[in-house]
Image (spheres, coloured by chain):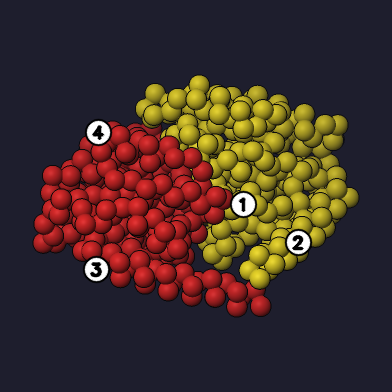
Chain colours: A red, B yellow
Amino acid sequence: MEIQVVEKILQANDLLAGEVREILGANGVASFNIMGTPGSGKTSIIEQTFSRLRDEFGVAVIEGDIATSLDAERLSRLGLQVVQVNTGGECHLDAGMVKTALPKLDLSAVDLLLIENVGNLVCPAEFDIGESKKILITSTPEGDDKCQKYPLMFRLADAVVVNKVDLMPYVEFNRTNCLLSLSNLNPQAPVFEVSCTTGEGLDEWAGWVRTQLGKRKRKS
Amino acid sequence: MEIQVVEKILQANDLLAGEVREILGANGVASFNIMGTPGSGKTSIIEQTFSRLRDEFGVAVIEGDIATSLDAERLSRLGLQVVQVNTGGECHLDAGMVKTALPKLDLSAVDLLLIENVGNLVCPAEFDIGESKKILITSTPEGDDKCQKYPLMFRLADAVVVNKVDLMPYVEFNRTNCLLSLSNLNPQAPVFEVSCTTGEGLDEWAGWVRTQLGKRKRKS
């Protein structure tokens, strides 16, 4: 009986994810589901992506947090369109939350929607939120074994960003182990080694995002 | 209907947590539920706690992970009694998993049982696993705003360990903000600022653990 209920919840979510996908598709909006552990640097990656693509594309953000609007305030100061979603305790975003947030955005001015999920390396992987791509942000202080210990999200990722490479001299992080485990688990996903402090690797990352957006022309 | 099922699951968990508490109590075992985000340093704190208390107390560990036995292997090399629990995808330990692990330990030789939960700053807070104390490990690279963004676990903690203070010069971490938010949210919990790399603060932490164990005499 419990399993039946869980299946029903996931089915309901998948229906809503389909609706989100339809709305975004009709508006020519590509969307990234940005996932990673608390403090991996999801908001910083969003800032850096925006600053590199703002002249070419319309970028908007949905900020998912259990509580507070700290990240949305931080992003809105950059002049981004941002909607805050507070999950009220829930450990992940679901498609219904994203669908509710969409009318608060002017999608006619958006080419790329970055959806920052709740900081959690487990549960968000299980919920389709209607995104075009799943992006996993991990960071060197977390250690090089995270993709072995939390495999599902790493396996589903369309791209992996290894953030905070500037901290590598100060933390225990075996780069070879990390890259090897990633390529064993998910050989398709490109890996970007970046630092939001020094800027290292971020142009390559932004270049990949650009290729995902294809021939879109800036709407606004 | 979904809510009813969730309540039933939590009720079933609470019953099992009561049984775990009874078994541990009958054997004179204190138990800490060690929670925190992936890579916050839960395993390192366990290592450091063990090395400081091993001559005074019998220490054992239950290692909770979604996948792999990397941490259990690391700890068993120290000569600790360790049981690995793989949750098989679940984002938290529950009392049933802990109860199943207990017969694999020789509790007659254990004064302190350290239970390392799955790396997750959200879900483990919702499940009583029969522990005597909840310990939250956070770390400076995660940022100083984590207790505002993920309040439940910080609120429930009996003690908070701020790990990786040696990285403070290299990361954005406002110590005053962190300590102020912690004391606003949970004024009772003592806070230990530590580094498993330099050893800073770990004797104070071990001293607090010692006071929690009270007049227990080393069993084995």
Q: Residue furthest right?
A: B26
Q: CA distance from mark 1 to mark 4?
A: 35 Å
Chain letter for the residue marked with disc 1 in the picture? B
Residue B132 spot, x, y in % from top left: 76, 43
Viewer-nearest of discs 1 and 4: 1
- Image position, residue A89 (x, y; %): 56, 50
According to the picture, the residue beneath numbered tag 4 turns out to be A198
- The amino acid marked with disc number 2 is Gln
In the rendered image, the quadrant that contains the N terminus of chain B is: bottom right
The residue under label 1 is: B124
Depth check: A55 or B15 in front? A55
Confirm whether residue B85 shows in the render.
Answer: yes
Kindly identify which numbered label has been placed on residue A26.
3
Q: What residue is shown at x 85% (from left), y 53% (from top)? A: B22
Alpha carbon separation for disc pair 4 and 3: 38 Å
State how far apart marks 1 and 3 are (Cα). 39 Å
How many angstroms separate mark 3 from mark 2 (CA)? 45 Å
Q: Residue at x 63, y 68 (%)?
A: B2
Whole-number angstrom distance, CA of label 4 to CA of label 2 = 50 Å
Q: Is residue B202 in sight in this rendering?
A: no
Label 4: which secondary element: loop
Left or right: where B170 falls relative to B94: left
Please identify the quarter of the rendering in which residue B212 is found. top right
CB atoms of marks 4 and 2 within 8 Å: no
